[in-house]
Image: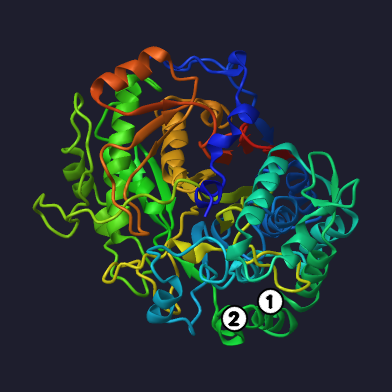
Amino acid sequence: MSQLLRTALPFALLASLLALPAAAQPETGGGDRLTGPDYARSPVTAQHGMAATSQPLASQIAVDVLKQGGSAADAAIAANAALGLMEPTGNGLGGDLFAIVYDPETDSLYGLNASGRSPRGLSYDDLQRELGDRDQIPLLGHLPVSVPGTASGWGKLHERFGRLPLEDDLAPAIEYARDGFPLSQVISYYWQGNVESFRENSDLLPESQNWKETYLIEGENGEMRAPEEGEIFRNPDLAGTLETLAQNGTDAFYEGEIAQTIADYAERTGGYLRMEDLRQHEANWVDPVSVNYRGVDVYELPPNGQGIAALQMLQILKGFDVADMGLNSTDYLHVQAEAKKLAFEDRARFYADMDFADVPVQELISEEYGERRRQLIEMDEVLSAPNAGNPRSVSTSDLDPTMRERLNSGDTIYLTVADSSGMMVSLIQSNYAGMGSGLVPDGLGFMLQDRGALFTMEKGHPNVYESGKRPFHTIIPAFAMKDGEPFLSFGVMGGGMQPQGHVQVLSNIVDFGLNVQAAGDAARYRHYGSSSPTGEAMDGRGTLRVESGVSEEVVNALRGRGHSMSVGAGGYGGYQAIMWDPEEDVYWGGTEMRKDGYVVGY
């Protein structure tokens, strides 16, 4: 398999495309804090409603739905449906969905896990035989395919929080799918890379005609190619699928013609999904879990996702005077990277489907455990291959590490919407690596996800493959409350970057007082090389990669402490956020400058 595919189109390839001019880079070196607005774009402010997504047309669609009387949930569904068409490199009906909803009527947060399970007809032994001498589940073909959960997530959101008919929510995406839309810049870049990968690895696919007919257009010489920036793309098959859901409800995805088409396609091409897998699928409402970071209650969803890694990092970091260190100073980046290493070793050891594994969530995110893990950080030394901890023991004995990070990249969309009632939706959706498995069921217009590649084949591990089980997930929505009021609906997409990104933008706001846009524009770090729940173990210290906004002086000082450093653009995720100001009754929105991000308010 090509390196391009194995790393899910690594963001490092975007360096030349996404590098910012020097004038746009914040001053972040030498321990100085960011104190002014001149290094970032202005945040968007609005009173009645707001949407922040990674594609301008999707943000506009969401606000149009709000203006029609739709709730934030209606608008989130509408935007997500549009993004499945406009950004298939990051999401779609063949993928999974997670969300956190703040409901002002009940003054409560609701978590939604709409991730799918592995085929019940594919046992561990059968999968092992299919893998042969490979020790990991591939990213292409039928072996990584799990039940798509997105449609069920829309159904749960609409049933509980929707105000408009589902038909109205899906109408804009249906219209754009039929009539077409012009491709935006970053999405076009990813599209080209996905097509190259599918072609280079066509031997892993049982058939290639369907994805070509769906995602390629005819060039001047009659050759089928990926659409380019500014070119009009249409997907009439997806329009038909969405219209079926609009008319018959999201259950139509798991029963009837759509489900039968998926099952028939899988059986015809050697796959394992069957009608029974689709019929038995159900999204679940779950309780978000939280920690308090300097007066802000930060909420994430429990596993099978990685959200609690951000909470573990925050529990470790709140024992340091981060604000006094200075944003992107040597001390700041050192303690951030060390906290990430410790949290990710626990992520590799414990995180899994809680229907199959006893995950000690409350112990992992407790203050006591955060204090114990914090004691392992030395300011003048760098942790090398730290062990996972033992959160259920009062001792500091550690467990042996057994895995290594495979989750460097992930292609995802994150969006957040807020309405005039005060409802706020934090939603994330993905096919996992790139567009997904390379498999497009006949005439449906979407690709099946490859999320099952995130199982491990290591027997006895909590995340080991089993039939009917949810794999470990990288995609995580986040939410924060302050003084009993909704404060911030936010997310940072991008594989293993996500918990690190959540912590950074929250620290930028809480510790350094940055506004919601500046918090995302500030230069970021990303640590690579930790152990992972897919069966890979950390070797050495990993690599701490930083954007060019971090000063050369700080980079050299970190090298002097023992960090393996890398400087460059790309790989730092995609941020969207909406902040609520209860005193003025105003929403503040921020979006990702490293993508095609866009905030709209009214």
In the structure shown, which secondary structural element does the residue marked by tag 2 occupy?
helix
The amino acid sitting under disc 1 is Phe
Q: Residues within 10 Å of mark 1 (few under 14, many from 20)?
A: many
Spot occupied by residue 474 in the image (x, y as percentages of width and height)? 46, 54
Q: Nearer the viewer, residue 53 or 482?
A: 53
The label number, if any, that marks residue 278 in the structure image: 2
Would residue 165 be visible to someone looking at this image? Answer: no
The amino acid sitting under disc 2 is Leu
* Relative to 257, 348 lies left or right: left
Q: Are marks 1 and 2 in contact (CB under 8 Å)?
A: yes
Quick check: 345 above or below 276?
above
* Relative to 482, 159 lies left or right: right
Quick check: 34 above or below 369?
above
User: Residue placed at 19% from the left, 56% from the top?
Assistant: 391
* Relative to 319, 40 lies left or right: right
The label number, if any, that marks residue 253 in the structure image: 1
Would residue 435 be visible to someone looking at this image? Answer: yes
Q: Earlier in the sequence, mark 1 or mark 2?
A: 1
User: Residue placed at 41% from the left, 77% from the top?
Assistant: 129
Q: Nearer the viewer, residue 512 or 251?
A: 251
